[in-house]
Amino acid sequence: MPENQRTNRGASFGKLSLTLFFALFYMTTLSASKELSSKTENVSHSEPVAENHSHKSTHAVNESITHAAGHTETESKFEPGKMILDHVSDAHDWHLWGEGDHSVSIPLPVILYTSSQGLSIFLSSNFQHGHSAHQGFVLSEEGVVKWEEESNEAAIYDFSITKNVLALLIGSIFLIVLVVKMARHYTNNQGKAPKGIYNLIEPLIVFVRDDLARPTIGKRADAFVPLLLSIFFFIFVLNLFGLIPVFPGGANVTGNISITLVLALVVFITVTLNGNKYYWKHIFMPDVPVWMYVIIIPIEILGVILKPFVLMLRLFANITAGHIIILGFFSLIFIFGNMNPNLGFAVSPLSVAFTVFMSLLELLVAFLQAFVFTLLSTIYIGMAVEEHHH
Amino acid sequence: MQLVTPAIGLVFWMLVTFSILLFILKKFAWGPILGSIKDREDSINQSLSQAEQARNEMAKLQGENELLLAQARQERDAMLKEAREIKDRIVGDAKSAAEEEARKVMSRASDEINKQKSAAMDELKKEIASFSVQIAEKLLSESLSNNEAQQKLITHHLNELTQKASA
């Protein structure tokens, strides 16, 4: 078992570093090309570019292509880094199409709590894409709600239904409807073979129960199976929703650190609450000479915290990296399009091909990361409830 | 940095949503699903073991049948063998009895023949004696007249006699 565990951890660690490497690689190339393009534009236009109408200066490519033909007054500049970050980050509205001030998006409720004003609830469309203030709040360029007067230092607790919260709710409702219907089908057809989509879900359920929980956790396994199934299907469904480019998908939910934080927290709490005496003895009274406790105990405590921390980071990094790579491939079209519209058209088939390939890979990753998260959770729980016979 | 900084709102909503999700799924989805999967597995296992049992029983019955069949065959063979023996014995007995009878008939016949033969011999002897006497009578009566005629007569009578005897 520890051998197996180590190889698993090693493999996922290698994968994590690989994805991070790729993400970094793309980010640096993109920001480099961004700098390059802005430099060339500064050189080519002697008159100052009137572009500061908007906070968000990202524009649609067709706009930039048509404008590049002649008029230079509203010359736009494509910033891939900003575009990508906008897409993988949370937002107060659900962007559908268009760029900057012309973009069409679904406004979402903003819910703020401040000590001075109490609860403030209003629609995010009141911000007018960050142009106007509402009830004393403004939307910053990063999409964060701030005080209108910059001198105001009071804390704002933002409980808004953001894009990720809505995506989270949609994904959860989808999952609940799916499996509750499945449960009803199963209770109504007791002892019969499953049908349709349930043929796809049941192997996953049986896989989590028979191949993850039971061999790893042992005789208490069945008590943890519902939790593990919930984690697995939650991550899997939201990963898949994240791959859909348009509403109701496209939100980078499982690639958001807050989401993975809570998931890891759930695992951490489960492990801590179910840890038996051997688990705690292993941490606070390990079988080493007493003078080594000074070193061992901090390490063990660090390990306890590090395990869920790694869970959190791995899922976040893998999913975000996948989104970034796909967006990066699309950015290539606009980067080249900014240099020369024809070049942009020439590059687009290549970009699309790469994006299709990456999307297929992401389908695999969607399953794989759900599986890895569940597997590691199972192993951590298994370590906590393992019975030792010395 | 915004990317790697947890947002309090999202954490809060995630906590709420995930708790409700866990509760609902555990109570209304995973419980019934896992239960019915387990039931189904149990019933399949049970059916399989029942089928196995039935198969074993079949095999046992078949074995018994074969044993019975073999016994019956053996019995039949024994009966046939016995019948053949009886037949052979009867035929043998009949044959020996017939032979005995034939022998008896033959011996009786040969006895009869012998008896007839001796009787015929006796008759012949008597005949010859009487013939001899008659010849002697005739010889005696003719001897007086002619020697030659005598000779002729004797030969004649003798021929007559021998012809009679041989006939």
Image (tube, helix red, strand yellow):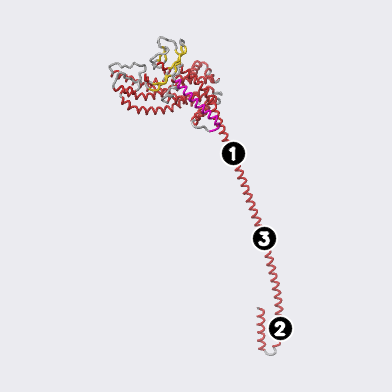
The outermost residue toward the bottom is: B145
| Residue placed under numbered mark 3 in the picture | B94
The residue nearer to you, when weighing B43 against A377, is B43
Q: Quadrant of residue A88?
A: top left
- What's drawn in magenta, residue-wise? A164-192
- Residue A273 x, y percent position in the rendering: 54, 19
Q: Amino acid at mark 1?
A: Ala
Q: CA distance from mark 3 to mark 1?
A: 59 Å
Q: Quick one: SS at disc 1?
A: helix
Q: Position of residue A216 (x, y in %)?
A: 52, 26
Asked if residue A374 shows in the view, the reply is no
Give a yes or no on whether discs 1 and 2 share a subunit: yes
SS at badge 3: helix
Q: Residues within 10 Å of mark 2 (few under 14, many from 20)?
A: few
Between the C-alphas of marks 3 and 2, the distance is: 59 Å
Residue nearest the viewer, comparing A168 with A206 = A168
* Relative depth, front residue between A210 and A121: A121
Residue B152, placed above or below residue A264: below
- State which mark lies toward you, 3 or 1: 1
> Which mark is drawn over residue B134?
2
Marks 1 and 2, the one that precedes in the sequence: 1
Name the residue nearer the viewer: A387 or A202.
Answer: A202
**Label 1 crowd bin: few (<14), some (14–19), many (20+), radius 10 Å:** few
Q: Earlier in the sequence, mark 3 or mark 2?
A: 3
**Magenta-drawn stretch contains A125:** no
Q: Which residue is mark 1?
A: B54
**A46 is higher (above) or lower (below) than B123:** above
Kind of residue indicated by mark 3? Ala
